[in-house]
Amino acid sequence: MSRAVSIPALVALLAAIALPLVPGVPTYWITVASYIGFSGIVALGIVVLTGVAGVVSFGQAMFVGFGAYTTAILTTRYGWPAFATLPVAILITGTLAWGIGAITLRLKGHYLPVATIAWNISFFYLTGGLDFFRRFDGISGIPPIAIGDFTFTSGGASFYYLTLAIVALLVVLTANLLDSRVGRAIRALRGGVLAAESFGIDTGRARILAFVYAAVLASISGWLYAHFQRAINPSPFSINASIDYLLMAVAGGIGQIGGALLGSGIVTIVREKLQDVLPHLIGTQGNFEAIVFGFVLILIFQFAPEGLMPYLRRLGGRLSRAVSPERPVVAAPPPARLPPERGTEVLGVADLRKTFGGLVAVDDIGFTVRAGEIVGLIGPNGAGKSTTFNLVTGVMPASAGEVRFLGQPVQGWLSRRIARLGLARTFQHVKLVHGMSVIDNVVIGAHLDGHAGAIQGALRLDRAEEERLFARARAAIARVGLSEYEQTIATELALGQQRLVEIARALAADPVMILLDEPAAGLRHAEKTALADLLRDLRESGIAVLLVEHDMDFVMGLTDRLVVMNFGSELAQGRPAEIQRNPAVLEAYLGSAA
Ligand SMILES: Nc1ncnc2c1ncn2[C@@H]1O[C@H](COP(=O)(O)OP(=O)(O)OP(=O)(O)O)[C@@H](O)[C@H]1O
């Protein structure tokens, strides 16, 4: 997420500030601009929730309703001043969203969006059916927002400027949040739960945080809306409105802050125009714009899945790639943890077993890896190497047996808990976060070295910690020889370099041990030599390395010991030279490969 202010954004901001000052500007324009602000706030939340965290919600209008009904009830029934109800609306929405998220976000695939639709429909009929909410008649007589004697009049410049100030504040807070440790945890979700969890990120929590943040933004929009309209009923908080909000975010560019505001502007203005024009064209009244919007949504998905923002950017001539801001280069901090003494057992596996139904994928395997040692796990396809990796890293539970890390039994632990002890890994199929720079990807590895939460991140109180984490990431990138690519989008690099980025990400965790899943796959000869040198260097520094690899030349020249698997069982263990002479291995595996 870029933090540099682009020229089009600056022009848009100045135009927004100047709008009410233009002589003779119709009040209608200012009203429409205020509406763009209200919906832009909701769309901003959708950028974080859907664009960044990848959670599709068709229920954001419900959270707008939470904010609107909270202030409507507190001001009309209990005489609260408008400003006093805002923190309450945020608190109520945040708490309810946390509860709703905790239940709903467990759902996978299309069940999750469907559940958000169900929540929204329930809210619509709840508010429309209960006297407490004044049913479909709604609540009227909502007072205007006022400070002392000054009143922010609906449709006037003062209310518009208040909205603009809130939008600007939320844009800054959102940009800060996304550029923080918590923001990276949310963005890491796009690289896959497996990768994020293996660096200590609680992905469930990151998803809920994104959900709550988007809900709170929607609630603030609802609060503004209620005091603008001065009367509310369930209609503006229906599922139709939720779809409109999603359309806004998608139309603008779902992954970008500017896209939320652009989309909100376009959809709001087009809807206003269509509501005027369509009844004349069709000859009868009705919500025909919903049909047109449905078509538009399909067209956008088909032809501009990234929304209109990228086109505008090209027009504006800036064009920032989605890279992280330049940060002051500070010296790398001392390691978060020191490796244990050379020769100490780091990983101990005993009688490890995994069955899938009737298939014994790992059959009572046992081996150790010591500090300052490179051990290779080899075997033909389907031998059970990846499954062993998954058992050791906590990706799946073992059926039986023991895994010790630094002497501590860790079987049954979640990956993120094992990661805390200093176990880092790479993946057979590279798992980097799309659209993120090399350094932003690598700094995810240092997640556990930081502590800053969402509020510290949004308020930018995390700078010292961020500098430390980035220094760690930068040192790791230098170690794998990719310093010149720090700002390049990681997934645009060649595969060999992407594998090195994964190793850098693992190194940023200051690990005691690294597990590498087929690190040489897809690498050219020179790249393999460089990789082998790097791994020897890691061994020298006392790190324990376990690697699964099919490239026998690479393995034989590099490893200290080999564990050979076949059909889930251990076939042999020993030094590479011994393994190369082992008749059982030659027959089962190397015989055909050598
Ligand atoms: N999640 C799973 N569910 C069911 N069976 C599985 C699962 N994962 C692996 N297996 C089976 O377990 C066996 C071992 O597979 P595994 O992927 O661990 O082998 P491998 O040695 O890593 O192979 P490759 O070198 O091809 O990656 C295979 O027969 C595979 O089909």
Image (cartoon, rainbow, N blue to C red):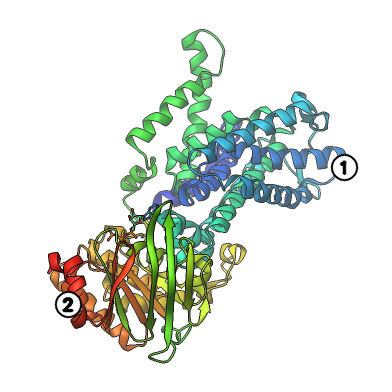
Ligand 1 sits in quadrant:
bottom left
x 37%, y 83%: residue: 543
- What amino acid is at disc 1? Tyr
Q: Is residue 487 above or below residue 228?
A: below
* Residue 240 visible at all: yes
Total labels drawn: 2
In front: mark 1 or mark 2? 2
Name the spot of residue 305 as percent of width and height, x first: 37, 39
**How far apart are the two marked residues, 1 and 2, measured between alpha carbons?**
83 Å
Q: Residue furthest right?
A: 78
Q: From the top left corner, tell me how far across and down residue 125 is, in percent.
A: 70, 28
The reply to whether residue 3 is visible in this rendering is no
Which quadrant holds residue 140? top right
Q: Which of the pair 546/89 is nearer the observer?
A: 546
Q: Determine the secondary structure under disc 2.
A: helix
In the picture of the structure, the residue carrying the numbered disc 1 is 78
Tell me residue 423's x, y (percent).
44, 74
Question: Residue 470 in the image: x percent, y percent?
Answer: 43, 74
The residue to which callout 2 is attached is 580
- Dot 1: what SS? helix
- Residue at position x 51%, y 67% in the image: 416
Task: State the mark number for residue 404.
Answer: none
